[in-house]
Amino acid sequence: MRTPDDRWAELAAAALAGELTAAESAEFDDLRRADPARAEEYASLQALAGRLRQGDLTWTAPRDADDLWEGIQGAVDGEVSPKVDFVPDAAAARRRRRWVTPLTAAACLVVGVVIGVSGAGAFTSTVPSGPPGTLGAVEQIAVSDDVGGVDVSAEVVAHTWGTEAYLEASGLDVGATYELVFVGVDGTEFSAGEVLGSDVPIVCRMNAAVLRGDAARMELRDTGDAVIAHAELPAV
């Protein structure tokens, strides 16, 4: 079942990308006027996105993150499977918005700080378990590296609003841009955002607006759309 928080997140993301329609802009303004806390939250996101675009934010990934799962399990939001899943609007799901780029960078920053400073033990959330497609459960997937010298591993989590990937990558060209893409069972592509290559391991949480049951494949691509690494996702 869709909630007001779902709509708020959708409008905030579209606003960051400058993609609000006139009607959506009026709706978003009303929400901010009615809720000062949300208005403050959006202002903070604007400032963070601006700094990320200007390149004046840097972070260092943890050097001792030998096990991706141990590094990110504490950051997983425990979710209980509802009786009815929210299915995103079809048009919105197919609109590949670039607003995910700054948000993905922010997720990378947060995970780096969490693992490097607090450690996974600082979190107490209960992580659900179950077969592929279980909401909130971390799903192990087998990633194949398509380029020599690159090492990519990943896990995915099904949510009511889409699919989240926990990505760890090393050996990527420093400063080069790479995009994580989910390919649907019907061939539709859904961007989960972009990352920059680094000389230290990259650890990110990335999100795509495709339900786990509709996703068949995950690919990490370079700017020329060449596949750097890929994983076939088990059917749900």
Image: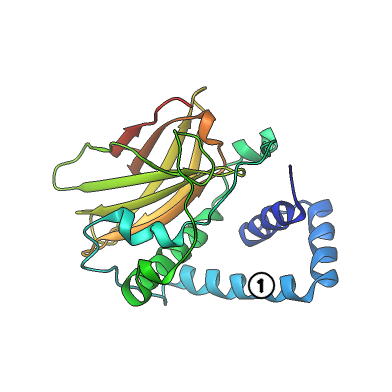
Nearer to us in this view, 79 or 34:
79
Nearer to us in this view, 205 or 11:
205
Q: Is residue 157 left or right of residue 94?
A: left
Occupied quadrant, residue 156:
top left
Q: Secondary structure at mark 1?
A: helix
Residue at the image point whose x is 53% and y is 29% from the top: 214
Give the colour scheme of this rendering. rainbow
In the picture of the structure, the residue carrying the numbered disc 1 is 41
Q: Is residue 155 left or right of residue 159?
A: left
Residue at the image point whose x is 77% and y is 54% from the top: 4
Occupied quadrant, residue 141:
top left
Residue furthest top in the image? 186
Residue 209, percent from left and from top: 57, 42
Residue furthest left in the image? 149
Residue 121, percent from left and from top: 37, 68
Residue 167, percent from left and from top: 35, 51
Nearer to us in this view, 134 or 91:
134
Q: Quadrant of the N terminus?
A: top right
- Kindly identify the amino acid type of the residue bearing the numbered disc 1: Glu
Q: Is residue 19 visible?
A: no
Q: Is residue 166 visible?
A: yes
Crowding around mark 1 (Cα neighbors within 10 Å: few <14, some 14 to 19, many 20+) is few
Total residue callouts: 1
Residue at the image point whose x is 59% and y is 47% from the top: 80
Q: Is residue 21 left or right of residue 60?
A: right
**Is residue 58 positioned above or below 84 on the image?**
below
